[in-house]
Image (spheres, helix red, strand yellow):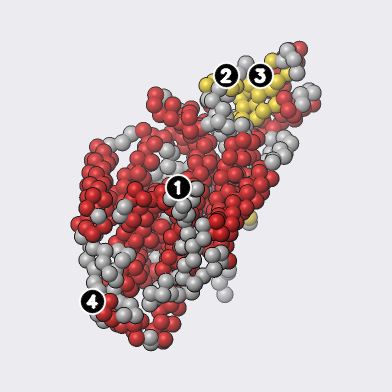
Amino acid sequence: MSEFRPEPSIEPENAPEFEERLLLLEREDWEINQAVLQPMLKSGWVFWVVVILLGALVLWGLYAWGYLVYWGIGVSGKNRPVYWTLFITTFVFWIGISHAGTMISAVLRLLKADWRRPITRGAEAMTAFALMMAGLYPLIHLGRVWKFYWMIPYPNNRFMWPNFQSPLMWDLVAIFTYLIGSGLYLFLALIPDMAMARDHTEGWRYRLYRTLALGWRGTEAEWHKLHRALAIFSVAIIPIFLSVHSIVSWDFAVTIQPRWHSTIFAPYFVVGAIYSGLAALATILVIVRSGMKLQEFLRAEHFNALGKLVMVAGMAWTYFWFAGFITEWYGNEPVVRELIHEEVAGKLAPLFYLQMTANLLPIGLLVFKKVRTTPALLLVTTLLVNVGMFTERVLIVIGNLERNHLPFNWGTYRPTWVELSIVGMTFAGFALLYMLFSRIVPYVPVWEIKEGRLRYTLRRIGRLLIPTAAEIE
Amino acid sequence: MNNTITLLALFEKSTQTAEAIDDLYNLGIPDENMTVITGVPYPERSLGRHREWLTLPYIVMGGAVGGLLFGLFLSVITPHLYRLDVGGHPPVGFPPAAVITFVFTMLAIIVSTFLGVLWEMDFPRFGTAPYHRLVTDGRLAVLVECLPDLEQKVRQVVNSHQASYVGEPERLVL
């Protein structure tokens, strides 16, 4: 009978290597500051070439938007019955992307999940920039963008007042609230790192960081108040992020359009948003890690945890998708049958199978730890998720509008160059803002990393050294 | 306290800092005359300090009530002022009113938390203040306000706990 001997995870002689893994225990504070600041201060030519290319795409998109404003919404492919097109599709996509920031930052902060620390700022920035891009689409979709202020409730000589029973008004207030909330949340957690950057820079950067640090010194009272405020933010922003995508889903669900009029739409949209948002975050982190040489901060353990979250979100998305699909299929209503046939065996079939493959295959791939912890594999897998999620939104918004209860009113849609250019503009704009952000603001939340180091110690239990975290927050 | 002087002591370790603070208490320096500045949020009371009472939760609650009332005003009162009958619905329906009221309540909570914490921290504060740049590189600073005749004793106490620097603090532009 062989003696039972548990596999030692950390032998004492391996402790230094493990300490290195435990949130940089061996690093001095000034080393961490420099490791975060240096990539911000030095940008190679590749960075600037990409910035110029993205800037050119944004300018082209702005030209296309100007063209649309000048000639009218008719230059888009919008028609009857496809009255919501690529603009609303991409709007839903960006709202979805914006969800992971809050998910990672607020939920994991409340759960005191330590692996969140190096990735929270990147996630929060993603939320803010994705929301900015999403917020453009209702304006673009209006066509007559200069009439936007009619939606703002103020007494006016037109004697007109916004209709708060309209889901479009709910959209306006929900997106505005989420944008304000995520922006303030991002900024609040940034203040101590602005002070750190202020203490280590000069010139325009010093002036910028000094202004944004608001006079922060790091007194006990300041830390205590910041912690309390972040805790309140974390609790308050979770229902906001749930409500935003629910409200976006109600834009669809409160109509009588076949396949939209569904009670499951709100949770289905929320879960889909979390799936695509988490996948987008993983994609971005892999790129930033390589571009800014942040391998010391964004490590395999972070990608492993994030990959597991993406996988779980993917399973939840599959469940909600199937729950909706089986109900519609079983009902066998003529127009729904026609829509499902179009999707599964008609002209939308290539998109449908692309969507299913790109959304389901990553779930299977992410089961393997090697995929979750190898940046290149994770990049491909999570990009695939967002190809699938974008296609899903195309099918929901455009595919479902092509058929309705009145067969004489059926139609098709093709995007025009104007729409494609404007959609390209928001993708380029997002990437551009994110790249500039990563060079102006400490991408890794330094104070949170240092706080994480305070939490950890190695405790000897029998022959093993076990990492333990103290309850200090 | 009139005619006081301010000293700044820098420490490398939190244990030394906590012990120095204990000895400064024993010397008769009251809590309100000591300020600990760190680049990392140390756990509450780990440095032997009192727990500060915050009004922030009350500010947030006030904001929430304000947001709730404003949301109700927009979704319940104003539709009667600008009546618009759509889709056979009553001018004010519970579901849309609930959505609008909820969102404005949450918006007010977020904004009042942000403004409340800035107000509590007295931010923005762009003047000069006693500070040391090594704080963000990991040093712990203790600012002590005391009468001139205690200066030597204060210096002895902090030096006995391996303070790496003791002296008058530089007032830096923050």
Identify which residue, A126 or A467, lies in the foreground.
Answer: A126
Instruction: Name the kind of residue labelled 1 in the image.
Output: Asn
Identify the residue at image location x=63%, y=49%: B66
Residue beneath label 1, please? A157
Question: What residue would you read off at disc 4?
Answer: A347
Amino acid type indicated by mark 3: Leu
What is the distance, in whole Å, between disc 4 and disc 2 at their CAs?
72 Å
Instruction: Look at the numbered discs 4 and 3 and tell me whether their residues touch, using CB distance below 8 Å.
Output: no
Among numbered discs 2 and 3, the one appearing first in the sequence = 3
- Whether residue A330 is situated above or below residue B56 in the rendered picture: below
On the same chain, marks 2 and 3? The answer is yes
Q: Identity of the amino acid at label 2? A: Arg
Q: Position of residue B165 (x, y in %)?
A: 60, 20
Residue sitting nearer the eye, A181 or A353: A181
> Share a chain, discs 4 and 2?
no
How crowded pointer 2 is (Cα within 10 Å; few <14, some 14-19, many 20+) is rated as few
Q: Is residue B8 visible?
A: yes
Residue highlighted by disc 3:
B7
Label 1: element kind? loop
The CA span between labels 1 and 3 is: 63 Å
Disc 1 versus disc 4: nearer the observer? 1
| As drawn, A112 above or below A201 | below
Mark 1 vs mark 2: same chain?
Answer: no
The residue sitting at 79% across, 23% down in the picture is B28
The residue under label 2 is B171
Within-10-Å neighbours for mark 3: few <14, some 14–19, many 20+: many
